[in-house]
Image: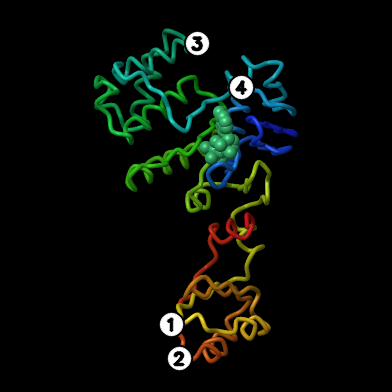
Amino acid sequence: MINISSLTKYFGKTRALDNLNLNIKKGELLGIIGPNGAGKTTAIRIVCGILRPDSGDVTVDGYSILKDPIKVKSMIGYLPEEPNLYERFRARDLLRYFGELYGVPKESLDWRVSELLELVGMEKRARHRINTFSKGLRQRIAIARALIHDPPIIIFDEPTMGLDPATSLAIREFIDGLKGEKTILLCTHYMDEADALCDRVAILNNGKIRDMGTPEYLKAKIHGDIILQIKIKSPDIDINEIDALDSVENVNLKGLNLSISLSSKDEISDIAGLIGNNMLSINTKEPSLDDVFINSVK
Ligand SMILES: Nc1ncnc2c1ncn2[C@@H]1O[C@H](COP(=O)(O)OP(=O)(O)O)[C@@H](O)[C@H]1O
Ligand SMILES: [Mg+2]
């Protein structure tokens, strides 16, 4: 559905995208995860026709963003990283205004606006002005605005950044509800968000894809099944001794935190024996996308 091919983009001497290739299938929710400055927003802005790449192209349903920008834009709903809403508008009027701009037929516009306000839980605030809204309420209106023309593709740039946990959860649930029905590209630096929502995840760093796959695949690939987290009292410890055990795949010591990935639980007691009195606490955890991420960008 979306075909990103060989995108390169410089800002002055900064290379924001470095020959980026990515395919997003119809009906898929694809996540792009990456730290600040990875190039996520730049990639999205090129897909949406806001920025021109230095080289490469993006096609959406076969249409090129460079050759058919109007056609491509009509197929995409875009939630920018920092949505700019017209402060003095009332919520309903703002959506009506954008509906007209996007060519929503007049006879269905009122109905469409009401439906969207309800969908994002803002029907009671339809007559309130944008400048009275909190960040979370603005984000809901910005999402409704992105959906106004009922596009088959929706692109979310950091949809929950800086929001309180309850609003973040509501927005994640909302995105989850669109799954299957829409083709979705979601950029986030929250690994748990990507893990919970995405069918596939691409890890972006320095403008390049470092790894890609389902969250399960990525987690299984990087680590064994188990991660042992041990707090120690003193950093005076021989990690090579632990690394030499059969089931130990990786040992990582940061300050007084020892993180060990294991292919099985068989030797946990041997590890505990090696650390002995130096051990303060021990915990096991399932690998998360955070672990995958840290491994693939380091
Ligand atoms: N308009 C711009 N002018 C100059 N540099 C930019 C601009 N937009 C992005 N960059 C740079 O490009 C790189 C990628 O940025 P961005 O795409 O915003 O990353 P992300 O969204 O992953 O945080 C960064 O180094 C950033 O500073
Ligand atoms: Mg960004």
Task: Name the residue carrying label 4.
Answer: 49
Q: Nearer the viewer, mark 3 or mark 1?
A: 1
33 or 94: nearer the viewer: 33
C-alpha separation, residue under disc 3 versus residue under disc 1 = 65 Å
Q: Looking at the image, is mark 1 or mark 4 earlier in the sequence?
A: 4
Q: Looking at the image, is mark 3 or mark 1 earlier in the sequence?
A: 3
Residue 88 in which image quadrant: top left
C-alpha separation, residue under disc 2 versus residue under disc 1 = 8 Å
**Which residue type does callout 4 highlight?**
Gly
Label 1 with label 4: CB-CB less than 8 Å? no
In the image, is the residue at mark 4 within 8 Å of ligand 1 by its beta carbon? no
Is disc 1 placed on a helix, strand or loop? loop
Can I make out residue 153 in this image?
Answer: no
Q: Is residue 263 left or right of residue 182?
A: right
Task: Name the residue carrying label 2.
Answer: 277
**Which dot marks residue 233?**
1
Residue shown at 72%/24% (left/top)? Answer: 62
C-alpha separation, residue under disc 3 versus residue under disc 4 = 18 Å
Q: Looking at the image, is mark 3 or mark 4 earlier in the sequence?
A: 4
**Which dot marks residue 103?**
3
Residue shown at 63%/86% (left/top)? Answer: 241
Q: Nearer the viewer, mark 2 or mark 4?
A: 2
**Which residue type does callout 1 highlight?**
Lys
257 or 183: nearer the viewer: 257
Q: Nearer the viewer, mark 1 or mark 4?
A: 1
